[in-house]
Image: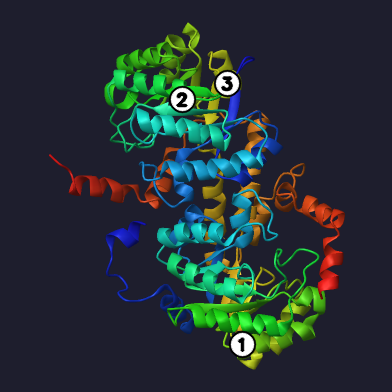
Amino acid sequence: MEQGVVLAPGVYNALFAKAVEHTGFDAVYITGFGTAARYGYPDVGLITQTEMVQNLKHICRATTIPVIADADTGYGNIINVRRTVREYERAGVAGFHLEDQVFPKKCGFMEGKAVIPLEEHAQKIRAALDARRDPETVIIARTDALAPNGWEDALARARAYREAGADAVFVDGIRTLEELEIYSRELAQKGIPCLYNGGLVTAEVAQHMGFKIQILAGLALGAVFKSATAAMQELNASGSARQTMAQFNPPGEVKSVNDILGVPEVYELEQRYDLAGEEEKIQ
Amino acid sequence: MSSSNSSPNSTPNSSPGAKLREAMAGGMVLAPFVYDGFTALIAEGQGAQAVYMTGHGTSAQIGLPDVGLTSMAEMVSNLGYIADAVDVPVIADADTGYGNAINAQRAVREYETAGAAALHLEDQVFPKRCGFFEGKQCVPMAEHVQKIRAAIDARSDPDLVIIARTDAVAPNGWEDAIRRAEAYREAGADVVFVDGVKTAEDMDIYTRRLVEQGLPCLYNGNLLPGPEIAERGFKIMITGGGHALSYAAVCQALVNLKDGGGGEGRDLDQFNTITNLLGLPEIYELEQRYAID
């Protein structure tokens, strides 16, 4: 974050997090939308803190790059927020965002969002800062006020959350370039560290606009949706998914799925501890 | 979750196992590989009549290779999400049953409770490894026969489909694999599954020596398209891209982004298709139905 913009592609499981690290990114973003989808649900606050943390544990263990996580509303009030901060830290995240939606929340791009009073969320941010055991844990205050309340309120909230001590702020639900420009002009270029969620511009442009973090929350989910849908359509039409699988071959320089999961290391360990020899003796 | 919530009477009193047996009575069941609720919903949305929960993919999504590190509890957790997400029967990988016959009995009860229509138990030494990896080893045939008997005794729904898998082709050759498949069927397995079928010759042996002898058989792979596997008389085929396809597609998107891609904006149609698939319209309906004012 010190130098330029951190570009964090969004994934929702450990395999895809490994892929993000392997293809050379400096950080990975764990999407709540994707985590909910993984469990078969829409992103409307049905997924519990326990399930989010469980997923994060697997992901943090599978990667060495910083993990930026979605912590939704903190799963309740400030007391819940305290526990969420501790659980997320213990899972191994580098940072996470807390949003000012009414619990249960909705995806930032869905209809029907509602926000809690500004001061209540400022207190949540203070509680989160007080709860962290590692002062380096990056706490990002997200506001969802743009859709329900408009820019004036969203800007007031972002400033207040920064004032309360948030390391970065995140105005979600940016749908157009005009909105992105307002975000940049009123916050990112006014010295407030800002996170942009979306792909309206490249990372290079986002950096030029003053953003510190850009996340592409839907990257993995979109790729999985496209490829799996194509495979299922082909399977229905011809009883085979081979063409789709050939079309989505991993790029040449990318490790195979078994290699990235560490199968060669397992064979090495078996040699080192002579596992095969032992099994022969048992037989 | 969409249809299980909104249409509770679609198939009254029909267990997942019974649904699968009904589908098998109508011809070969083609079950695509899925590894989470999302891919299961995609498969169901495109008309799959059943889905197959891969152990390889379940391990991969928690960052582990398929060498018996993933616990039964982790498999059951994933199975529960998949079975809740879709209405079609779920055929699940149960590895070795996670230990001996006693462990296998607990696995059967847990899988059944989680909503499995079928599960397969393999004759590898615990901890197992993927059917297509090197270095597989099998327990003695008699031991796996007992495990299959134990599994059958443990199910509370007699329609739960118990599939006996043998991994003996690679370590021991076809004669042993055939002997084992026959013995597991004799012990009461509903279906047998010879894994590690790699060549057209393997496929011909499998067809001639087991399928054509009247044993209900499962084929895992894509040597031939579904209709040809069905014509050979197989009862179940598990196939498709699964997590390997997803991994490849995600890597493509990442490499494209790394090479300066991105910045193309939002795909609103795709967002809406995905949220519909996940049941968002039903959530809005429920909000209306239980609204306070």
How far apart are the two marked residues, 2 and 3, measured between alpha carbons? 12 Å
Q: Residue furthest left?
A: B293
Give the image quarter of residue B250.
top right
Q: Residue at x 60, y 18 (%)?
A: A1
Label 2 crowd bin: few (<14), some (14–19), many (20+), radius 10 Å: some
Choose mark 3 or mark 1, whichever is in front: 3
Q: Is residue B159 left or right of residue B147?
A: left
Q: Is residue B166 left or right of residue A117?
A: right
Q: Is residue A208 left or right of residue A183?
A: right
Q: Residue at x 43, y 59 (%)?
A: B45
Residue A264 drawn at (x, y percent): 80, 52
Residue B235 appears in view: no
> Tag 1, which chain?
B
Q: Which residue is mark 3?
A: A136
Q: Residue at x 83, y 52 (%)?
A: A268
Quadrant showing the N terminus of chain B = bottom left
How far apart are the two marked residues, 1 and 2, measured between alpha carbons? 59 Å
Q: Element under label 1?
A: helix
Give the image quarter of residue A151.
top left
